[in-house]
Amino acid sequence: MSTQIYRYADGRLANSLAIAYTLVGYVGGIGLLLSGHWAAIAAGTLLLAHAMIVAAYLIHEFAHGTIFAKPRHNEWAGELCSWICGSCYAGFQDLRKKHMRHHVDRADVITFDTKAFLARSPAWFRKLVLAAEWAYVPAVELIMHYYVILLPFITDNAKHRANRRKVALTLLIRGVLFGLLAYASPLAAVLYFVAWSIMLTVLRFTDAYQHTYDAFAVLEDGGKIPDDKTRDRTYEQMNTFSNVVSVRWPVLDLLLLNFAYHNAHHEKPVAPWYRLPALHKQLYGDDYAQVLPMHLLFKSFHQHRLRRVIDDNYGVVEPEGKHRADGFYGAVGVSFLTAV
């Protein structure tokens, strides 16, 4: 029987550090929120937010099975990180299956179409969502997270109804824990939500600019997407972008566990996060046209923050120039943290 813990021997140190940072950062961040000192509270909010961000990208790694040697260990760790990220109302395997469809179909496959939902919602609700998005509140992501919670109680689908007990128990446990935090410090409870919102915003910014795929709303896991074009590996690479934190200082991409090296990830999905910079350099060199440094995307993220919510078109990326991403509206509601 194999006693190997990590899937890849060269990942022992990197994975151990990432997991330890997530756990220590999460617990330590909450501790700092309760410290009573403003500087420590501010630092705790940022530490907690970043621990959640790293936990989210670890979920992505667990989904691809790149960390632990045994699938069940990846699943257990994925469930734990889902609790840290607040995405624990759906099972880890549901999150994983949705994300795998993204890779297999080379499309953004969703079962809950937020744009169609907003289009048929009352005008006051739609205006409220758009006002929140204008103020940089991640309203669409919040809707998706709450929809995952409500789904087992509002559907006739037997698969989802079977999750009622799990969702109710999860709500109870998280509600009690959050209530205890609020009892100890109302400010800490508010800032915990702020930290979680920072995580959502960072993830949605990164997710928004990694693909110009077609988006399809399908009813369930087995729903088919239209066979209207060739979605081969060439299509995949030309509609995938590496929105790296920094070209000049690639070490900064460790803040996001190298998730932004997205072309390399799609070319070799089983390559672990710590190998992606070297793999990117090996595959594409230094002047790959699909690289979109994040500083080129801030303007688009600001200018198109409402259009992105209601427009089915992701926009276009020009071949070159410092303004080449200005017409890239980006995607919304494609988070791998929601199973819809």
Image: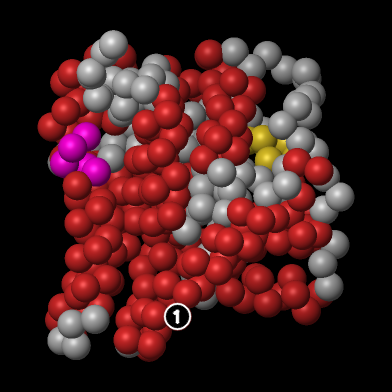
Front-lying residue, 125 or 38: 38
Majority secondary structure in the magenta region: helix
- Is 188 on the left-hand or right-hand side of 312? left
Identify the image quadrant of residue 106: top right
Residue 246 higher or lower than 221, as above or below? below
Q: Residue 272: x, y in percent? A: 30, 25
Residue 103 higher or lower than 218, as above or below? above
- Is 50 on the left-hand or right-hand side of 134? left
In the image, which residues are magenta?
A: 15-19
Residue at 34% in and 53% down: 53
Residue at 82% in and 53% down: 155
- Is 263 on the left-hand or right-hand side of 54? right
Can residue 319 be seen here?
no
Residue at 81% in and 59% down: 154
Identify the coloring: secondary structure
Identify the image quadrant of residue 95: top right
223 drawn magenta: no
Q: Quadrant of the C terminus?
A: top right
Can residue 25 be seen here?
yes
Q: Residue 51: x, y in percent? A: 28, 56
Front-lying residue, 334 or 314: 334
- Is 69 on the left-hand or right-hand side of 91? left
Q: Residue 65: x, y in percent? A: 40, 25
Q: Residue 307: x, y in percent? A: 64, 58
Amino acid beneath label 1: Gly
Which residue position is annotated with label 1?
Answer: 179
Front-lying residue, 168 or 127: 168
Q: Secondary structure at mark 1?
A: helix
Identify the image quadrant of residue 253: top left
